[in-house]
Amino acid sequence: MSDATETPARPGSEPLIEVSDLHITYGRRGAIRRGRGVQAVQGVSLTLTAGRTLGLVGESGCGKSTLIRSLFGLSPVASGTIRAFGKDITRIPPRQRRQFGGRMQMVFQDPYSALDPRMTVHEIVAEPLRITGAYDRRAIDELLDRVGVSAEMAARRPGEFSGGQRQRVGIARALALNPKVLVLDEPVSALDVSIQAQILNLLDDLQKDLDLSYLFVSHDLSVVRHVADDVVVMQAGRFVEEGPIGQVFDHPEHPYTRTLLDSIPHVDFA
């Protein structure tokens, strides 16, 4: 079939991150070979497509953090594959991983411990650019302004900021290398509800303005319902349900999903 007659891809259909039948096992090497290791992640598969937000939900200890750490080469993959931007990164060495590492960045849960207290805000955001030899003071000031931190505040250290302000700095640092994907690990769980709304609205604006894709990890389903297009529900290292957010939340099929949904308090993030 010629190019002229091919059907163009739908917006948002480009796969950026593809995890296929992933298994992650912890323990001594001999114990793992004998099948006695701890199976933290068991046969999970997911796809994050361009311009969309995929929510990953489940209770603490279900394997969410282990899974997202594997995207950055920080969890030992026993089997399965992880493809990022079309390349299998499952077992590539760190030097090769750094060649495209800027395209996927992490925003951490705790804005108090994620920032070096000895560095100024400007230095924190500038660090990734200095490492890559792309430092630009004006670009950093513009980036801080985009997340709601004025250039006048850039000379201060994290201890002088509130939790919400620190999370804004963390988001700015994650954006410094112009990534296409942000992995957001419980990004608002340490914040008051009113501040949560501000950060979620900021993330929504950034996604639209910068054409970002989000993997949004949380135990809080009320937050996930507000931000996600699609959702996967994780229990004891496995995915038990997945689909469009409206389908899963309005018509849950798995008992565990129904239990989680029954526990949601109503919170308005508008």
Image (tube, helix red, strand yellow):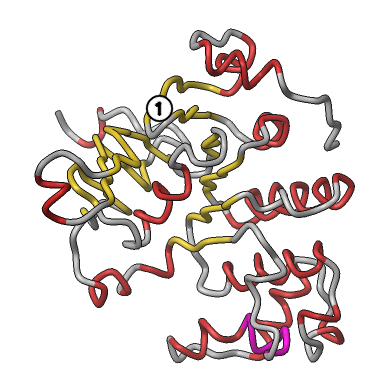
66 in magenta: no
Image quadrant where residue 108 sits: bottom right
Rendered position, 243 above or below 226:
above
Residue 109 image position (x, y, % from top left): 63, 57
- In-front residue for pair 107/209: 107
Q: Relative to residue 160, is residue 256 drawn left or right? A: left
Q: Relative to residue 30, is residue 141 drawn left or right? A: right
Rendered position, 177 above or below 248:
below
Q: Amino acid at mark 1?
A: Phe
How would you classify the magenta stretch by its main secondary structure? helix
Q: Which residue is mark 1?
A: 239
Magenta span: 119-125
- In-front residue for pair 209/65: 65
Image quarter hosting the N terminus: top left
Residue 249 image position (x, y, % from top left): 62, 17
Q: Secondary structure at mark 1?
A: strand
Which residue does the image show at 53% across and 56% down from the upper left?
A: 182
Image quarter hosting the C terminus: top right
Residue 92 image position (x, y, % from top left): 19, 64
Which residue does the image show at 66% across and 69% down from the upper left?
A: 170
Which residue does the image show at 43% across and 70% down from the upper left?
A: 102
